[in-house]
């Protein structure tokens, strides 16, 4: 849990009210982690999770251990990282290695479309917030950032991983053992702010702020703290983009590419994108709080063929035998190339661009 005593003072972030637009929202399952306390509840959640991942790919999580006031506090810190630190300081603490998210990702590094660059800033924090240097204004909050990562790993990620293992009829701790805490160089806690763009850029990009993708969720499980500004959409099975609706103090969860590889395609990394917010929110910066999990760096991303479910239902191998990358190899390539690769139009799917990484086709959806 976040420290509750002797917290340093912090300017409160006031979130905007949710959109009042009549939008086409996706119908997501709600996973209530309080049901884990009984065998019957666990069995119900396993079945609910399986349906959610096979039919939609995203789901909500509630009763995850954070109170609304604790969630508000982490948004206060996220807001500070962007709006109370100068651009000069952000550049000083920008990520030094394109293959490792740590520190700031500055705006205008990714090409969105038609020569238009992104208006996105990120601040990524290691499991152990003290292992890298932060701007002076953020340093008093490092203990809270570390506690936030620990909370997400043990109280949210691990229960989800256990449910995933059970849904594949694998031993309960199969995925948990692949995810050690504080043993790799990744930075799972990430604050992301999208800034409003000029109308000319909206026209050139058809209002898309981040192309349809399964990456950068290149790991196993992505946890997003629901926030009221719209923009996140998922591609539904009927090939329509649908909005994700805000639920106070809920988490929005989806699987990344590594989990798709480990599941042999039984569970897929859902295609999603970020677009210009609804009309009543278009002039407001969109602030997000995320926890991105990845397997241990030495895990090879081949299907868990010992799963009875995969043996019954079938599975796909994404890499040639002998050429299966480790999580570290996949992570470094995806991170270094995201938003910078020269993409080629797919010859099979309209509006899809592709690149090849470690022999696997990575798709981007316009």
Image (cartoon, rainbow, N blue to C red):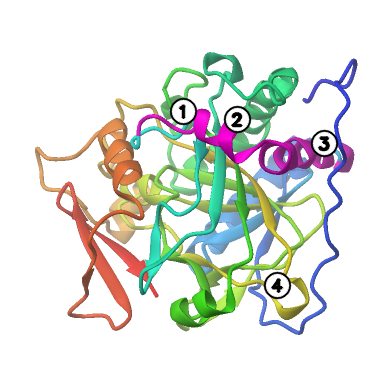
For the point 53% across and 58% down, which residue is it? Answer: 119
| Inter-mark Cα distance, 1 to 4 | 38 Å
| Inter-mark Cα distance, 3 to 4 | 25 Å
Horizontal placement of 126 versus 73: left or right? Answer: left
Residue 130 x %, y %: 59, 15
Q: Quadrant of the C terminus?
A: bottom left
Few, some or many C-alpha atoms within 10 Å of disc 4 (few <14, some 14-19, many ≥20)?
some
Disc 3, SS: helix
In the drawing, what numbered circle is on residue 179? Answer: 1
In the drawing, what numbered circle is on residue 282? Answer: 4
Few, some or many C-alpha atoms within 10 Å of disc 2 (few <14, some 14-19, many ≥20)?
many
Quarter of the rendering containing residue 333: top left
For the point 74% across and 23% down, which residue is it? Answer: 141
- Give the residue at mark 3: 73
User: In the displayed image of the protein, which residue is found farthest to the front?
Assistant: 88
- Give the residue at mark 2: 153
Range drawn in magenta: 68-97
| Inter-mark Cα distance, 1 to 2 | 9 Å
């Amino acid at each position: 849990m976040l420290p509750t005593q002797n917290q340093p003072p912090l300017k409160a972030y006031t979130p905007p009210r949710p959109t009042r637009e009549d939008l086409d929202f996706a119908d997501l399952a709600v996973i209530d982690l309080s049901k884990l306390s009984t065998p019957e509840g666990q069995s119900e959640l396993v079945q609910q999770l399986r349906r959610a991942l096979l039919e939609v790919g995203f789901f909500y999580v509630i009763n995850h251990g954070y109170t609304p006031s604790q969630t508000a506090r982490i948004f206060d810190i996220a807001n500070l990282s962007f709006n109370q630190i100068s651009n000069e300081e952000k550049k000083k603490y920008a990520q030094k290695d394109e293959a490792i998210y740590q520190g700031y990702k500055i705006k205008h590094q990714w090409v969105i479309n038609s020569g238009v660059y992104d208006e996105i800033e990120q601040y990524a924090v290691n499991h152990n917030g003290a292992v890298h240097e932060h701007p002076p204004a953020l340093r008093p909050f490092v203990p809270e950032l570390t506690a936030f990562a620990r909370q997400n790993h043990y109280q949210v990620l691990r229960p989800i991983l256990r449910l995933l293992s059970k849904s594949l009829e694998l031993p309960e701790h199969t995925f948990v053992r692949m995810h050690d805490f504080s043993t790799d160089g990744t930075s799972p806690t990430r604050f992301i702010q999208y800034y409003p763009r000029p109308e000319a850029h909206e026209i050139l990009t058809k209002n898309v702020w981040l192309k349809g993708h399964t990456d950068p969720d290149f790991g196993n499980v992505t946890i997003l703290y629901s926030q009221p500004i719209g923009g996140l959409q998922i591609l539904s099975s009927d090939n329509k983009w649908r909005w994700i609706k805000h639920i106070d103090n809920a988490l929005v969860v989806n699987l990344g590419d590594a989990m798709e590889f480990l599941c042999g395609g039984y569970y897929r990394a859902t295609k999603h994108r970020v677009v210009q917010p609804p009309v009543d929110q278009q002039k407001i910066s969109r602030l997000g709080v995320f926890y991105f999990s990845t397997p241990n760096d030495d895990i090879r991303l081949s299907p868990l063929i010992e799963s009875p479910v995969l043996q019954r239902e079938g599975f796909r191998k994404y890499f040639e035998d002998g050429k299966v990358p480790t999580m570290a190899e996949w992570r470094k390539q995806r991170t270094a190339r995201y938003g910078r690769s020269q993409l080629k139009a797919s010859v099979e799917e309209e509006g899809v661009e592709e690149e090849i990484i470690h022999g696997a086709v990575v798709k981007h959806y316009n």
